[in-house]
């Protein structure tokens, strides 16, 4: 009886986690993904800060110099926070990619004493690769 109650709690927990999961982004076709990826400039703390400060101005948060002429500390704070986040993403984040078995197809050519050889193959196990977020 105790085991059944424990299983019920585990199932309830798993169901609540699944219910909270977000819908995954659609996978882009590889040609489109490649074309889009090479056009990305990378993360820029200065550009992000400028966008945040512009948005702050739009919602009424003062972005100019203070009335006494001193620098706006909100702008400086914004840059500090953004730079720390961008640095953490660039230095600490890892990209992991799973390559399903059979998804990489290769064709080889060669020759031996018997003549030309052509072979085809695929990856036979799932492969995980790591990259750097840029």
Image: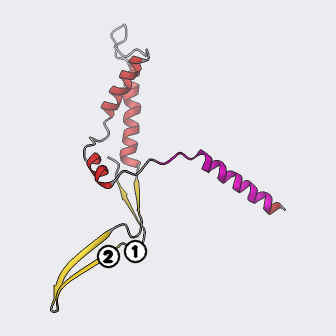
- Residue pointed to by mark 1: 124
**Residue in view at x 33 percent, y 34 percent:** 45
Disc on res. 121: 2
Q: Position of residue 70 (x, y in %)?
A: 34, 13
Q: CA distance from mark 2 to mark 1?
A: 9 Å
- Most foreground residue, 20 or 117: 117
**Residue in view at x 33 percent, y 10 percent:** 69
Which residue appears farthest toward the bottom when viewing the image? 114
**28 lies above or below 64:** below
First to last magenta residue range: 4-24
- Most foreground residue, 25 or 49: 25
**Residue 15 in magenta stretch:** yes
Q: Quadrant of residue 78?
A: top left
Q: Going by the image, does 108 lie left or right of 48? A: left
Q: What is the secondary structure assignment of the residue under circle 1?
A: loop
For label 1, the crowd category at 10 Å Cα-Cα, with few meaning under 14, some 14 to 19 and many 20 or more, is few
**Residue in view at x 23 percent, y 76 percent:** 108
Q: What is the secondary structure assignment of the residue under circle 2?
A: strand
- Most foreground residue, 12 or 132: 12
Q: Position of residue 54 (x, y in %)?
A: 36, 21
């Amino acid at each position: 009886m105790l085991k059944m109650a424990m299983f019920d709690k585990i199932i309830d927990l798993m169901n609540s986690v699944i219910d909270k999961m977000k819908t995954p982004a659609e996978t882009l076709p590889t040609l489109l993904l490649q074309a889009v990826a090479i056009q990305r400039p990378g993360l820029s703390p200065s550009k992000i800060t400028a966008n945040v400060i512009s948005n702050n101005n739009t919602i009424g948060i003062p972005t100019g110099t203070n009335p006494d002429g001193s620098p706006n500390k909100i702008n400086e704070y914004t840059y500090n926070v953004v730079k720390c986040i961008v640095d953490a993403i660039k230095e600490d984040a890892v990209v992991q990619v799973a390559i399903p078995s059979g998804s990489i197809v290769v064709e080889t050519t060669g020759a031996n004493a018997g003549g030309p050889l052509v072979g085809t193959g695929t990856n036979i196990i799932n492969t995980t690769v790591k990259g750097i977020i840029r």
